[in-house]
Image: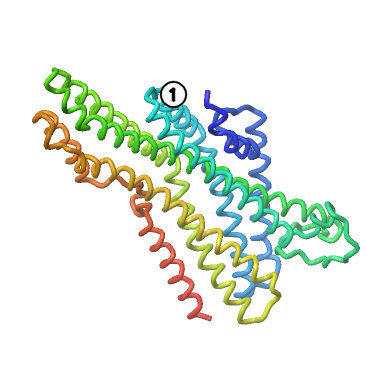
Amino acid sequence: MIDSQHWKLNRILLLLIGVWPLQQSNLTRFQFIFLSIIQITSIICQLMTLFTTKCTPDGVVTVLSLVLMFSFCGVTYNLFFLKIELMKDLLVQLQNVYIGLKDKHEIAIMNNYICNAKRYTLIFTILAVCLSFTSVIILSPKILYIILPMNVSLLNRQPIRMEYFIDQEMYDYLISLHISMSICIGTIAMAAIGTIIVVCLQYICGMFRISSFRIKRAVHINMLQNIKATKGNLILEGIISAVDMHRQAMKLTKLLLSIEETMMFCLIMLGVMTLSINLFRIFQVISTGDEFKEFIIPSAYVVAITLYFFLGNYFAQDVTDHNNDIFATVCDVQWYAAPLYIQKLLLFLLQRNSKDFTLCIGGLFVASMKCFATLLKTSFSYFTVMYSTQ
């Protein structure tokens, strides 16, 4: 069983949307189906406006700028659920690695990364709550009017163009509730799924750091003095344990990649389109002098997508850097003072570094800060193309 103290907030967030891997039942499956239907119907109702109203280029851009963002959240939610059994296996293996640590220094290293993961989860959760609350106020203000009654008349026009094929004035509050629920579900899903992936990556970074620590300790000068006392096996055992931890870290990284690869590939495609469309929507609002409220929505989505791209590539780059640190450690230790058979063993470690260990998405995108810059460049290129056709 997973230690609830290490995953407490992540567990709460995933339970809210019915995808906590270690607690699946008929009730949670029904919860997922219900929430997923709310998201899907909100997307369909927005797309229906393209067929029931007169389509103009500006109107299409306005609809797509919101639909793509809703789709971004929906794809994350549904594809994660499809891989929930693999995620359960990954969480169990990570916890087993932690339980298997016996050295107090190694436990301290892992606890440090666990604390970092908790901080990231808390920060991203607060940001998600703020974004969700702000989006509900802007996109569905009547919900706030229900919670906090005010003597202020609200416009009947919904900020989001939706087609329900019913009398929208009569069911105005139900429509506002539907929109608000869809926004909250999508925001919580992005925060919950994003943070659990960050937590897993932090555990893996901790494993790489422990591997580096074991190599340093194994080839430490104080231990070299014990070789004459026929204790050279201590160095050999230390390096073997370091290699074993490194192998486990790589194995779990590949398992995590198999869970999120399809999801991340789809999110990259949708994210680039969402970023481009919303940048163009911002240009439209500025050029036509629309209400300030119309400017806030696409701006918030541009910031959200950019931040998501940055964080995803940043944490993936962090894993690659931690892996490279292991081979930097091998070069930095006093390997020349070790016995010849130990030097040969270290040489095998260095040969492993001849091939970069990266998180490759769909065989096209290598998650890194360079990839983040490429995605931004691509998004701005598409925006430029749309602007030139204006």
User: Relative to 59, is 150 above or below?
Assistant: above
Percent coordinates x, y for residue 161 in the rendering: 71, 64
Identify the residue at horizontal 11%, vertical 37% (top origin). 336
Q: Which quadrant of the figure has residue 223? A: top left
Q: Is residue 219 left or right of residue 190?
A: left
* The one of 96 and 116 positioned closer to us in this rendering: 116
Amino acid marked by disc 1: Ile
Q: Is residue 78 visible?
A: no
Outermost right residue: 151
Identify the residue at horizontal 63%, vertical 69% (top origin). 62
Which residue is tagged 1?
99
Percent coordinates x, y for residue 141 in the rendering: 78, 60
Q: Is residue 222 visible?
A: yes
Q: Is residue 46 left or right of residue 279?
A: right
Percent coordinates x, y for residue 169 in the rendering: 85, 61
User: Relative to 85, is 193 above or below?
Assistant: below
Q: Is residue 354 left or right of residue 294?
A: left
Identify the residue at horizontal 47%, vertical 53% (top origin). 311
* The one of 158 and 329 positioned closer to us in this rendering: 329
- Circle 1: element type: helix
